[in-house]
Image (tube, rainbow, N blue to C red):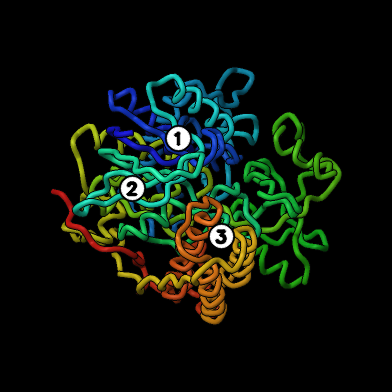
Amino acid sequence: MDVDLLVLGSGVAGLTAAVQAAAAGLTVGVLTKGELHQSATRWAQGGVAAVLASDDGDSPDAHLADTLAAGAGLCDVDAVRVLVAEGPARVHELIATGAVFDRDAEGLLELAREGGHSHARVVHAGGAATGAEIERALVDAVQRTATVLHEGWFALDLLVEAGRCVGVAALDPSGTRHPVGARHTLLATGGVGQLFSVTTNPEQATGDGIAMALRAGAAVADLEFMQFHPTALHHPAMPRPLLSEALRGHGAKIRDGRGRQFVDELLPRDVVTRAITAQVLEEGGEHVWLDATGLEDFALRFPTIAASLAAAGLDPATDLLPIAPAAHFLSGGVLTDLDGATSRPGLWACGETACTGVHGANRLASNSLLEGMVFAPRVVEAVVAGRDGPRATGAMRSHVGDPEGRPDVVGGRTAQGLPGFPTGPERTADPSKLREGLQRAMTRGAGVLRSAGSLAATEHELAVLAAGAGPPSADPQLEEVRNLLTVGRALLAAASAREETRGSHTRTDFPDRDAARRHRLVFGVSAPAQP
């Protein structure tokens, strides 16, 4: 395959780019290690945040202010401005593509308020099945185009020639290795929730794109900011069933073991997560409770959640629901400019794989699907316009410099060098045991609460696991573990270097925010920006 644009991943960001690129006349290939519909997007219960009505005084400026507040000083203002300004039109484009969102009796879009939002501006589908509906609409749209689809293919590494990305090396479903060439390659491979034992992410979320970028020397930033969703159902199922923020927006309360409300449910996620974690530790238990008994028409409003609760033997009308934080979303990733260009010419990134600067140190609820919908088309527009490398815009300025010297631009610092990747002569454990050991170590030492001691102990454990992983192989399961180890060790290095508590990064030995550390920690080799 030799195409204009090779898309790696099949979530909202990748499929939006594929649809837009095909419409622009580009030849497009989509390569995904599962089936098209097997992405983290389909698991997203939360909706899409966009200012679609202004009757209640809402505005893009209010959405921008809420996003900046949640991002704890590390958002790129220009990137957020792009998100909130272009978001409404992208939502309407998705509706035109075929996505069906919830509407009231008069046919108007229902708008919900979620944590950190000052207004009700979040659209949902099926109550709490927004991701599944978006995925359905985009898969249908991609299958109607001339896009070349490669399902069951596993991308191993980026192909780089003379400093430029020219495609990937990949395994086909039979395990045979192939070079897959492309004029431009887009990383849209999602997040890395499988680093942790308790996560809302599917088993495919192993950070493959970020790991490939790290190995290829592309700039990667903000890896320490792993957001934990505060209200995952405490249940053996994995990924953990998510009790959507929409429940709290409709009036559900978080209670401790004695039934007392101990936190404002509509504060940003990092604040609620820390409060729940502290309460769990104080009580010596494993969870607190979500009280949704006062919500009317629960099954009608939230049919997906109602079904999950019924399967767990819980009735939200009468039962308090056990909840605990779960790894949910990585705010950092492969560093990009405002058009999705990375520091490697020919390589682009969008969605959770990317660090656009939109989320800063903590993502505002329901901005993630919107980010993919907004920045994927910008990648396509830049490719069509003949772009081939980064500009000094958006989060990329923290790496290549800001010629304007604006005080609202977040600076950058080179992160301490990536740890080496020791390999034993051969594997000493099977992939599933390696993954379990990795997840236990990361959850124990680099989860919601971190310290210098816990991070150092976790790095030692991951170094031992890395040696046991052995050399690169043609086993996709083992390569997923190697990718998790690559990203995990980079996350640990960044978390160790950030000696403060900011957003979703909490250091118990540095409990306060440090104004002197308002900068991104960047791994990778700098590349000159285009004018």
Label 1 vs 3, first from the N-terminus:
1
Label 3 to label 2, Cα distance in Å? 27 Å
Image coordinates for residue 388, horizontal then vertical, percent: 20, 43
| Left or right side of 447 for 141 | left
Q: Residue at x 26, y 63 (%)?
A: 525
Look at mark 2 in the image and give the residue it sits on.
79
| Left or right side of 377 for 279 | right
* Amino acid type at mark 1: Val
* Amino acid type at mark 3: Leu
Look at mark 1 in the image and give the residue it sits on.
51
Look at mark 3 in the image and give the residue it sits on.
195
Between residue 356 and residue 21, name the one nearer to us: 21
| Left or right side of 429 for 235 | right
Label 3 vs 2, first from the N-terminus:
2
**Is any part of residue 367 visible from this angle?**
no
The secondary structure type at the circle numbered 1 is loop
* Amino acid type at mark 2: Ala
Label 1 vs 2, first from the N-terminus:
1
Q: Residue at x 53, y 65 (%)?
A: 469
The secondary structure type at the circle numbered 2 is helix
Q: Quadrant of residue 314?
A: top right
Image coordinates for residue 344, horizontal then vertical, percent: 26, 52
Image coordinates for residue 148, horizontal then vertical, percent: 39, 28
Label 1 to label 2, Cα distance in Å? 16 Å
Number of residues whose C-alpha sits closer than 10 Å to that of mark 1, classed few (under 14), some (14–19) or many (20 or more): many
CB atoms at circles 1 and 3 under 8 Å apart?
Answer: no
Q: Quadrant of residue 384?
A: top left
